[in-house]
Amino acid sequence: MGQSHQFEPGHKAPNNGIYVEIGETGSMVQNPKSVKLKAGERFPETSNHNRKWMPKRKP
């Protein structure tokens, strides 16, 4: 149907952009890591094994 918006470490980025860490329930975390990836690059490890990556929201 649609594209997933949460990514595990090691998955490939679907698009160019900035991605931030989120909690396992989709909640925001304090001092999240942020990475800038190009399409096809792999997501790095998160600072906590329960976290995932999500595209940064545009203001």
Image: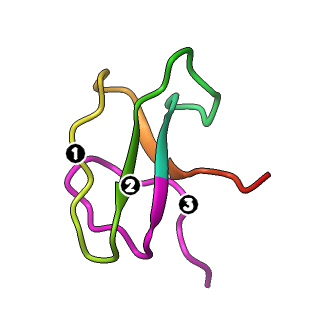
What range of the chain is rendered magenta? 1-18
Expressed as whole percent of the image width and height from the top left, the position of residue 57 reads 69, 52
- As drawn, the label of residue 44 is 1
- The residue under label 3 is 5
Q: Nearer the viewer, mark 2 or mark 1?
A: 2
Please report the residue visible at 22 percent of the width from the left and 45 percent of the height from the top: 44
Which picture quadrant has residue 29?
Answer: top right
Expressed as whole percent of the image width and height from the top left, the position of residue 4 reads 53, 66
Amino acid type indicated by mark 1: Pro
Extreme top residue here? 30
Between 14 and 38, the one lying in front of the other is 38
Please state if 32 lies on the left or on the right of 58 as rendered: left
Expressed as whole percent of the image width and height from the top left, the position of residue 1 reads 61, 85
Please state if 14 lies on the left or on the right of 31 as rendered: left
Between 52 and 15, the one lying in front of the other is 15
Extreme bottom residue here? 1
Mark 2 or mark 1: whose residue is earlier in sequence: 2
Please report the residue visible at 33 percent of the width from the left and 49 percent of the height from the top: 8
- The residue under label 2 is 36
Give the crowd class for mark 1: few <14, some 14-19, many >=20 residues within 10 Å.
some
Give the crowd class for mark 3: few <14, some 14-19, many >=20 residues within 10 Å.
few
Q: Nearer the viewer, mark 3 or mark 2?
A: 2
Amino acid type indicated by mark 2: Lys
- Above-or-below relation of 59 to 26: below
Please state if 41 lies on the left or on the right of 21 as rendered: left
Amino acid type indicated by mark 3: His
Q: Judging from the image, what secondary structure is the residue with disc 3 in? A: loop
Separation (CA) of disc 1 from disc 3: 16 Å
